[in-house]
Amino acid sequence: PVPERTEFRIPDSIRRALPTGDVVVELIVSTAGTVESVTVRQSPDSVYGALVARAVMDWRYRPASKDGKPVRYRLMTKVVVSR
């Protein structure tokens, strides 16, 4: 899949309280390009991981395709929240 919308904002007051480190998530992207499910595979903190997982559910993709038809796709990605 090709990312179409993958940004999200975390308020500064929350961002300052978060631990440092990246979050690795596994996504299932539907044939419509929406995120069907998110599994946090690595996170410096469970609250931080949950916050990122909720935000990732709003991401949108141009679906992957096989033989010209959209297909579901499993994707691993690292989310970096800048301070």
Image (cartoon, rainbow, N blue to C red):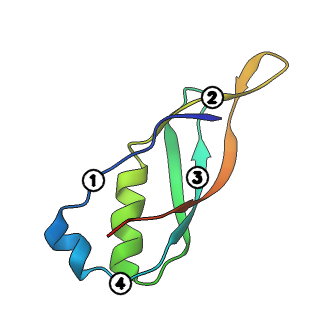
| Distance between mark 1 and mark 4 Cα atoms | 16 Å
**Quadrant, the C terminus:** bottom left
Q: Secondary structure at mark 3?
A: strand
Q: CA distance from mark 2 to mark 4?
A: 33 Å
Q: Secondary structure at mark 2?
A: loop
Q: Which residue is mark 3?
A: 27
Which residue is disc 2 drawn over?
Answer: 63
Instruction: From the viewer's perspective, tell me whether residue 39 is left or right of residue 70.
Output: left
Point out the tag, 4 or 3, that comes first from the N-terminus.
4
Dot 2 or dot 1, earlier in sequence: 1
Q: Answer with mark 2 or mark 3, whichever residue precedes in sequence.
A: 3
Q: Amino acid at mark 3?
A: Leu
Residue at image mark 4: 19
> Considering depth in this image, is 22 or 58 the residue closer to the camera?
22
Q: Nearer the viewer, mark 4 or mark 3?
A: 4
Q: CA distance from mark 4 to mark 3?
A: 23 Å
32 vs 52, left or right, is: right
Q: From mark 2 to mark 1, how far is it between C-alphas?
A: 24 Å
Query: What crowding class fits label 2: few (fewer than 14 Cα within 10 Å), some (14-19), or many (20 or more)?
Result: many
Residue at position x 35%, y 84% from top? Answer: 19
Given the image, on which type of amino acid does mark 2 rest?
Answer: Pro
Q: Position of residue 58 (x, y in %)?
A: 38, 43
Amino acid type, mark 4: Pro
Distance (Cα) linking label 2 and label 3: 13 Å
Screen quadrant of the N terminus: top right
Residue mark closest to the camera, 3 vs 1: 1
Which marked residue is nearer to the observer: mark 2 or mark 1? 1
